[in-house]
Image (cartoon, rainbow, N blue to C red):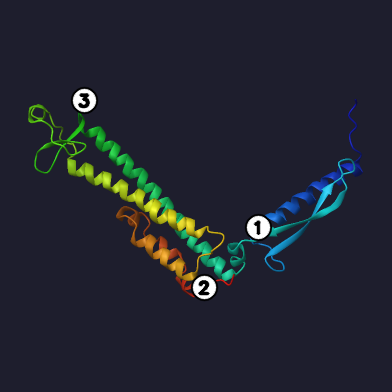
Amino acid sequence: MTFQPPDDATFFARMESAKEKAEDMARLERARAGLETGDGNAHDYLIKETDPVTGERKKKGSVNVKLSALDIALQNETYRAAYEAFGDFLKQYERATETALTRAEAALDDMMNRAVSLPGIGPVFRNINGDTVGIDGKLIDATISANIQWPDDAPSYEEYLQHKQAIEDIRRYQTDVLGAARDRYEDPNQPMTSDEFEQWQRRIRDEAPSGIKFKAEGIADNVPKDIMTTVAKPSL
């Protein structure tokens, strides 16, 4: 069977059909994102089907796009400004926390590389009392520890515990604070209120481990507090 290319009229009709179909889908996505408004909480958009031979667009029906409570709230410009500002604030703390965690883990790896390691025991340290202990804090037999040649840069047991605790604190903050804030922020059924924006902002600042507070210093200043405190609870 010999392929017959379409004539110019059919070709351009198909091109126009593809363009219109893409516009239909773009409108649907904008509706889902709350960027197009209509009557009530639902939006009806005309959907057409394309004739496979002529490329002609024919009316097929309509699709009903249900907007979430968050979609509706975001149609208010003042609320949307506060929502986006808090989102930027949260994202910067998330990035600062991820950076802090990566650096803390790298520092612990470096420390472990400098620690003395004994066959069958693993890393050992000297504690503040001068005793030799394993990674679990248990004393190493004196007959074994007496033969250890300690490098000048060998970490103490207290240093090891400090680094380990720092990592645990960052991970807890990442999950219990930032993770919880992200879940609340993205809840489509119960949009955050203006009070919650402020409460979460304060909690994120106050509970951040010291290293993250330093790295994220000044981030909160980018959030317009006048918006945060004046946005009314959205009527849903």
Please tell me which residue lies in front, 183 or 106.
183
Q: Nearer the viewer, mark 1 or mark 2?
A: 1
Give SS at disc 1: helix
**What residue appears at the point 56 percent right and 66 percent down from the top-left corner?**
80
For residue 221, the mark is none
Give SS at disc 3: loop
Identify the mark nearer the N-term, 3 or 2: 3
Identify the mark nearer the N-term, 1 or 2: 1
Q: Is residue 186 left or right of residue 204?
A: right
Amino acid type of the residue tagged 3 in the rendering: Gly
Q: Is residue 76 left or right of residue 146?
A: right
> In x, y percent, where is residue 205?
37, 61
- Disc 3 to disc 1, C-alpha distance: 60 Å
Q: Which residue is mark 2?
A: 231
Quadrant of residue 217 within the rendered picture: bottom left
**What residue appears at the point 32 percent right and 40 percent down from the top-left corner?**
106
- Whether residue 200 is situated above or below residue 153 in the rendered picture: below
